[in-house]
Image (cartoon, coloured by chain):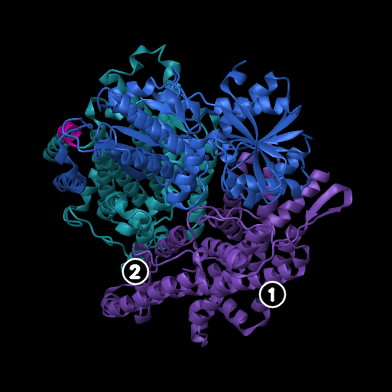
Amino acid sequence: MKGTYMLATGILAVSLVLCGYGCRSHGVKIGGPGGLQEIPVGDFSSLTGDTATFGTSTHNGLALAIEQANAAGGVKNLPIKLYTEDDQSMPDVARTVVTKLITEDHVIAVVGEVASTRSLAAAPICQQYKIPMITPASTNPAVTQKGDYIFRTCFTDDFQAAVMAHFAHDQGYKRVAVFKDIRNDYSIGIAKIFEAEFTKLGGTITGEQTYQEGDTDFKAQLNTLKGQNPDAVLIPGYYSEVGTIARQAREIGLNVPLLGCDGWDSPKLIQAAGNALNGCYFSDHYFSKDIKDPAMQKFFADYKAKYGYTPDALAALGFDAGNLLVDALKRAKSLTPSDLRDALATTKDFPGITGKITIDANRNARKAAIIMKIVGEKKVLYKVYTPEEIDQ
Amino acid sequence: MRILMLRVIAILVTFIGLYMLSQFVTYQMDPYYFQVLIECGVYIILAVSLNLINGITGQFSIGHAGFFAVGAYVGAAWTMIWQPMVVERYSFLQMGTLHGDILNLLIALILGMTSAGMAGFVVGLPSLRLRGDYLAIATLGFAEVIYVLLLNINSVGGARGLNGIPTLISSGNLALFWVFLFVIISIVLSRNIMQSVRGLTWLSVREDEIAADAMGVDTTKVKVTAFVIGSALAGAAGVLYAHFLTGISPDIFSMNTSILITTMVVLGGSGSVTGSVIAAIVLIVLPEVLRFLKNDRMVIYSVLLIVMMLTRPQGIFGTKEIGFPKWRRKQPKTEGRSA
Amino acid sequence: MRIFIQQLIFGIQLGSLYALIALGYTMVYGVLSLINFAHGDVYMVGAYIGFYACTYWLPFQRLSADPHATVMNIILAVVVLLLSMLLCGVLGVVIERFAYRPLRNGLGITDAHFWGFAIALPVAFHFHLFHRLSDGAGRFLFGIMWFLLIGMIVGYALRPVIRWISLRTVLSPSRLNALITAIGVSLLLENGGWLVFGPNPEFIGTMVPEKNFKILGGVIINSSQLAILVISLLLMLILRHIVLYTRTGKAMRAISHDIDAAKMMGINTDQVISVTFAIGGALAGAGGMMVGVLTHVQITPLFGLLPGIKAFVAAVIGGPGNIPGAVLGGIIMGVAEAFVGGSSFSTYRDAIAFTILIIILLVRPAGLLGRNVTEKV
């Protein structure tokens, strides 16, 4: 027994020694303002893993915004320092890195994540330490319901799905089938709201089939959907599968328009789909090269100059989240997380490049959505839906 | 009698020591390091419990994340779904107070361990017919089936998983206490099994199953027992992890996790409890330490794994132990009782 | 009825692909009793070779711009197929030579050089020596040269170390070790893939003209799918010929029967095992390339993970080490997946593979066509 006890103590000691050099800082100390040389801001993104493209885009946009703010003199005469952590597209890693950002790097705000699963994982931690978190592109409604320190600068899935339902109705589709990604909460959420809204508007959902992220063969499901004779098929998934799905749909003779959401937005979509997506529509954030807005065009130019390629909507959302944060930092009474939270919560008509951002009582941004049409191998701006139109 | 006294004292000292350590560490330690420490503890339980199946009994299970998932989900289902159903009738189950939290955690642990143990029983049964690689594939298949089931059951959140699980183990700053209590339980259990007469029959199954059978060892019982105990401990790890993280999703229990746990056992030395413990700590801390390497990190990790397997196939510790009393110093008779 | 036949056809198409990958697993299992986890990743490399060949290396014409390029593009596609098979075959041999052979025979001096390269790889990345193939062939080759130089120097430096280690290493017959090594190789290829190919999914556009054929009662067969089916069957027939009617094939069968006896009969087992890995790699490469080029699915470094596991399940269902069994297992898996995928239980598609597996393992532990070996005491 003595040996076992010694062993147990030994293990504890070893793990303490291994992990324990964190004891240096003696308890939690959260970014106090006293004697700050710079403003520490945290950023967690999926720089590697399944959704690396998304994370890289938002991170680049955010970094650009911070860089421009620093070049313009920073906030309250202090430069902003961005601490970036990679969460490898894993929710439990997101949890660890956010804890690290808050307790090790003492950031006073956290910007992060595209995928709602990871934002949902990180939000309770930010709430617990009372550090404001801004998610640039997590559209799941549950994210900001985690607490009063969690903000969002894009629209929600509920809104997006309602937009698609209205759009399908406006296009005159009566029967719509749904093909969703079972592993993706984003996809499931949109499918659910779309089905409810579309039925309310008088349409019929002919059937529902599912696939999984990473699948390569969808013909069996598509063949079943084809048997139901829909007018259109909603595929609320990511571009990585949608291209293949579109090709295989055309292969088996399912020639109706396909509808999608902001997950379709990627330059690679067309490469993947060839011309199979001709005549299809998807909803997206208010961001397109076709919009003749000087701020938007300037962002295109700046981003291209810094990173060498054209930004996508996620980069713009990251950029907006960064600018909103800078704006709130400027307006905050002091550089404490709670003052910053108050400043963020009172944001009104902030001129983001993806539309005017007003943070509502649920800490969500109310913004317009656009419908993009795919013509041949090009994406063109087709229609704009404002929140007011959907609310009616 | 004296031995019994010593044992009671040792247990008491362990409890009090762990409690004090838990209080001290929670106040003193940075939350990030604390999280890594708890994660180490959870993976030590997993590695040591898999070592019971793979290392000590010589079976070939590579689907340990399946049991981990069963424990985590059943435990979380108690605190999030079932407890709210019965709490109105039995008001003593109310959460929020320290003793209420501990009571609920214990119930979650019992439920999680029982169901994981039953899953272990179901998986252990094929081990009567399957050997080696085939058993490995069957266990991997089991873990994958659990994973797909979890993705598809809506009441536990599907792909999003369960979020907002109450942090029962952290109430009263006891997180470290609970996790390391189970670490100690699993280590002591392994050590006692290895040094008892019954444990020798387990080892004999590993060394030569046919010979063990011929000598009258009930190999069926040994294998199934190993599976049940190993998976129940993994279930306990799951319950603790779920109530520490506050959010679980099927992705945490994917095949990568199974492979990680198997790697811990092999790297530490199949059959060595010490090895499993050290390897679990190394494999959890290493990626955190290597975080600055960003993308190269996983490449280095995989190369290290291959080099390790080629240069030291028996693992870091082989079958040696550190801190265990010398093999068979006492009479086997007393050891038999201590099992 | 139409839907039923259509699903059946999809199932067979999918199954033929699983069978192609499963053959590699089953041959390796036959000769070495080793689950070569890295096989699925060889398939991934095959798809990437297809991608680079189609996009950067070979002068494919855009079909939409130039309709006369059809014949030329088809010829080029065949070249890509052969190239992919060749390179993946080499990759298979390299994996065997440097990861599995030391496990079998112990480390040798030549292994020092492999580890030299293994160390040079992260070093080269650290100093950004590698350029994407898309950055141009010149810069890419220059980077490779540096990498080779570093690798060689480190390799020579490692020789005494390896000699020292090899004297102190006890070979372990444990299956678990072999499995972990295979997992390590698989992780290496996947994570190496992140670095070399980048994490973003890649797509191969339309290179070969595609056409839908309608046959009886509205059942549709796509020309690309037909091509995959035909090429897979052709490769399987070639494999059958090799295994049944050549000396190497005979040696393979002898080794799978009893490796020690084969050695005693004067068979150069190491060489035959290398050939086995080469053939397996080539088949996987062909599969990966065909899927990438003809079905335009996304190619990521994790591309081979799921198909690899499913093909492996197919091999086990048919009976590991049994070549007709692998084909049968592949077809069963493909058809089962197509039917489950088309039903209202489509979310359980991935579970069905493992459910079939567990049932078959319990009913016939040696697989459908495997022979049940009674253990001699």
Instruction: Determine which residue is flagged by label 1.
Output: C238
Q: Quadrant of residue A227?
A: top right
Return the residue found at the far left: B2
Shown in purple, the chain is: C
Q: Which mark is residue C27?
A: none
Residue A301 place in picture, x, y as percent = 48, 46
Return the residue found at the far bottom: C266
Query: What's the residue type where badge 2 is placed?
Result: Ile
User: For the magenta stretch, what is the residue range?
Assistant: B18-29
Residue A238 place in picture, x, y as percent = 57, 42
Query: What's the residue type where badge 1 is placed?
Result: Ile
Instruction: Determine which residue is flagged by label 2.
Output: C119
Colour of chain B, in one word, is cyan
- Marks 2, 1: nearer the viewer: 2
Label 1: element kind: helix
- Residues C193 and C226: in front is C193
- Residues C250 and B11: in front is C250
Q: Is residue C63 left or right of residue A13?
A: right
Regarding residue B168, the answer to whether it shows in the image is: no
Colour of chain A, in one word, is blue
Q: Work out whether C29 lies above or below A175.
A: below
Residue B25 falls inside the magenta stretch? yes
Magenta region, mostly helix, strand or loop? helix
Regarding residue B285, the answer to whether it shows in the image is: yes
Looking at the image, do the residues carrying marks 2 and 1 touch, with CB atoms under 8 Å apart?
A: no
Residue B206 place in picture, x, y as percent = 37, 59
| Residue at image point 46% right, 42% down | B251
Q: Quadrant of residue A324?
A: top left
Label 2, label 1: how far apart the Cα atoms are: 38 Å
